[in-house]
Image (tube, rainbow, N blue to C red):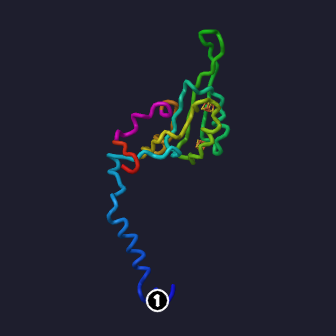
Amino acid sequence: MSFWDSILLLDIFTGLRTTAKHLFRKADTVEYPEQARVPSDRFRGMFRLDEERCIKCTLCAIECPINIIFIDWHNEKNELGKNEKVLDRFDLDLKRCMFCGLCEDACPTNPKSIWLKTKTYELGTYERDDALYLDIRKLTKWDHNVKPFTIVEKGE
Ligand code: SF4
Ligand code: SF4
């Protein structure tokens, strides 16, 4: 900083210019939890599993770097007399998840049978061990856990 800059307090005026710029701008806040912003398309939130679509290949469990997906299945004869895989267990220990998305990437079905981009982040709970351990029921039907709120698009 030059001598004249310190005498004229130019730094303060630079700071005040930024303050003044924001002073008259519309507040960029929403009344959460009554309102909530729509997360971006890349946002990784709550998992969703489509049990019908899943081919029980276990690739998602194999690819998970911390082994928190547990899948068991058995064969059953379908109406055509062919063997069909039936899920016994599809558990995900969400409290250890680092949301890397490798499980979703590994899933070979199109569209994916497991995905994280559900844009849901309402996961607050007092029952960590129970509520953040997801079984098939929770992975396929968790809508009742999500509070209804007014979605606000960014910039509204
Ligand atoms: S997102 Fe979670 S469950 Fe999926 S691979 Fe990563 S750590 Fe495992
Ligand atoms: S990778 Fe996809 S299809 Fe295979 S078991 Fe996992 S969710 Fe099902």
- Compared across the picture, whether 103 is left or right of 16 comes to right
Task: Residue 93: name its quadrant.
Answer: top right
Q: Where is residue 69 in the image (x, y as percent from the top left)?
A: 60, 38
- Is residue 142 part of the magenta span, yes or no? yes
Q: Residue at x 65, y 32 (%)?
A: 108
Task: Residue 17: name its quadrant.
Answer: bottom left
Q: Name the residue under label 1.
A: 4
Kind of residue indicated by mark 1: Trp
Q: Position of residue 60 (x, y in %)?
A: 63, 36
Along the line of sight, the residue nearer the viewer: 51 or 129? 51
Look at the image and give the residue range highlighted in magenta: 138-149
Along the line of sight, the residue nearer the viewer: 76 or 53? 53
Q: In which quarter of the image is ligand 1?
A: top right
Q: Residue at x 62, y 16 (%)?
A: 76
Look at the picture and state if 7 lies above or below 31.
Answer: below
Q: Position of residue 29 (x, y in %)?
A: 35, 55
Q: In the image, is the residue at mark 1 within 8 Å of ligand 1 by its beta carbon? A: no
Q: How many numbered badges does the structure rendering display?
A: 1
Q: What element carries label 1?
A: helix
Q: Which residue is drawn at 40% across and 79% down?
A: 12
Tell me if mark 1 has few (under 14), some (14-19) or many (20+) residues whose alpha carbon lies within 10 angstroms of its own. Answer: few
Q: Where is residue 125 in the image (x, y as percent from the top left)?
A: 42, 45
Look at the picture and state if 84 lies above or below 119.
Answer: above
Along the line of sight, the residue nearer the viewer: 18 or 37? 18
Look at the picture and state if 87 lies above or below 102.
Answer: above
- Compared across the picture, whether 103 is left or right of 11 comes to right
- Is residue 109 part of the magenta span, yes or no? no
Look at the picture and state if 56 lies above or below 14.
Answer: above
Q: Which residue is drawn at 63% across and 42% down?
A: 102
